[in-house]
Image (cartoon, rainbow, N blue to C red):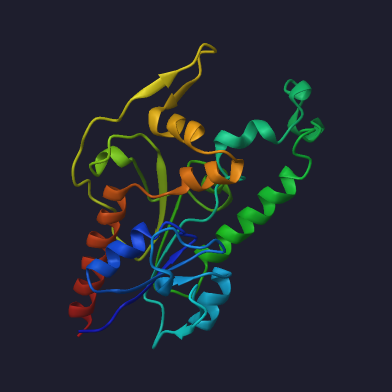
Amino acid sequence: MKKFNILIACEESQRVCTEFRKLGFNAYSCDILPCSGGHPEWHFKQDVLQVIKNKGGILETGKEYFIEGEWDLMVAHPPCTFLAVSGAKWFYHPDDKDLPIDQRRPHPNFPNRAKEREEAAKFFLKLAKANIKHIAIENPVGIMNTRFRKPNQIVQPWQFGDSASKKTCLWLKNLPLLVPTDIVDPGEYIEFGSGRRLAKWYSDGLTKTKTPEERRIWRSKTFPGFAKAIAEQWGAYLLKTEKKEK
């Protein structure tokens, strides 16, 4: 049987990578951050675009590793801080909310937000256009729905056994839609005095983390049931496709 090479881009948690590994795939995670999944020997700690181009690179252990053949599948989780609609309020000056967008000033606390958004969008598109046969990119609802195209599918953690709400868009290339595996309740919400409602898992992250960077990492982690479904379903699809091509 062919040894499929799978790259999980922008994944420090290694949750998706580990699920593919359990199934026998040659999977590697990649992020500029060190991994928290416990397997630095499976983690490229460097720019993922270079890992795609060079078919490998420097692992977190310090060793070099290069795959044989091509990357067969990439599952990418590009940073969403500047792309998600939830962060739109930080782009413009709060006093300019009634003005046309082209007349609004940058937010005084985040003057470079527009530039950072453009850089994030370009990075997303580079991943989407990578020379890899099978690609999945996940992100929250955001500007890439119009900058790139509408997603093929929108899923929730509660469709895969995790009692939590986190609307996630999937842009797919040569991959089938994911099928829900275990539909459960959508999880608790916390309502604040201001009327703002947050999913409890998200609210918990605000209290369990100390810095914006820690909160970003907390929010970006893939829910376990979702990670398992990705590996099992798309892994099975790769195997099925190989049999058809023989």
Left-right relation of 27 to 53: left
Q: Taking 223 as reference, is 30 left or right?
A: right
> Is 34 or 140 nearer to us in this picture?
34
Q: Judge whether 183 appears above or below 44 on screen.
A: above
Residue toward you, 103 or 27: 27
Q: Is residue 75 above or below residue 144?
A: below
Residue drawn at (41%, 74%), measured in percent from left and top? 41
Name which residue lies at 73% across and 45% down: 114
- The quadrant the N terminus occupies is bottom left
Quadrant in which residue 156 is drawn: top left
Left or right of residue 56, residue 99 in this image: right
Is 111 situated above or below 172? above
**Residue 175 quadrant:** bottom left
> What is the x, y in percent for residue 205?
46, 36
Q: Position of residue 115 (x, y in %)?
A: 74, 50
Q: Is residue 209 above or below residue 131?
A: above
Q: Residue at x 53, y 69 (%)?
A: 45
Residue at the image point whose x is 78% and y is 24% from the top: 96
Residue toward you, 235 or 39: 39
Percent x, y of residue 145: 51, 46
Residue 140 appears left or right of 189: right
Q: Quadrant of residue 171?
A: bottom left
Screen quadrant of the C terminus = bottom left
Residue lying at the far bottom of the rendered structure: 68
The number of numbered badges drawn on the structure is: 0
Q: Residue furthest top?
A: 193
